[in-house]
Image (tube, rainbow, N blue to C red):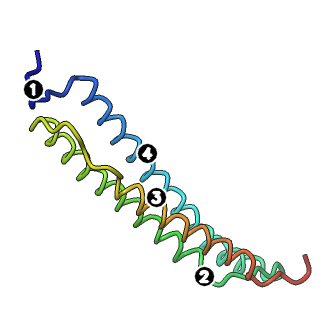
Amino acid sequence: METPGEFQAKPTDYLAAERNFLAWIRTGLALMALGFVLARFAIFLQELNLARPDLRTASSGFSLWLGTGLILLGVLVCVLSLVRYLRLIAMMRRGAKTFENASALAVAIAILLAMVGLAMGFYLVSARPVAGL
């Protein structure tokens, strides 16, 4: 029985923290996969220009940098989610009743992804049209 002022986390609390951690890991892996695809797309366009010079594809190389940035963002998400998970487990073991209000990791990633989305939209709108298509 719990005495006043003392809180003991239940196994379901630890499992919920682990599910949250694994969801962040999936998010990080998805960001890395998307970054890899974007980076490889730039290389694919370069090779296509060499193999088929008659197909004039316009690429500014922006997708390589954007893809690399997304890969690094995915790595950062995985590392920060590990730090958050370990901190949360330590708080539960100490018997903390309340935890941080908002997830700084979630807010930061949401802002970064919104900026990446805006950059991708700007790139698609401003990309030069390919002549002859």
Q: Which mark is residue 4?
A: 1
Tag 4 secondary structure:
helix
Marks 2 and 3, the one that precedes in the sequence = 3
Residue linked to disc 2: 61
Q: Please state, as top left, top right, bottom left or bottom right, where the N terminus lies in the image.
A: top left
Q: CA distance from mark 1 to mark 4?
A: 38 Å
Label 3 or label 1, whichever lies nearer to me, is: 1
Label 1 or label 2, whichever lies nearer to me, is 1
- Check disc 3 and report the residue beneath it: 32
Residue at 35% x, 53% y: name it: 103
Mark 1 or mark 4: which comes first in sequence? 1
Left/right placement of residue 30 relative to residue 95 reads right
Q: Residues within 10 Å of mark 1 (few under 14, many from 20)?
A: few
Q: Which residue is mark 4?
A: 26
Residue found farthest to the front: 4
Instruction: Give me the disc on residue 68.
Output: none
- Across and down, in percent, residue 64 comes to 55, 75
How far is the residue under mark 2 from the one under mark 3? 18 Å
Instruction: State the image quarter where residue 55 is shown.
Output: bottom right
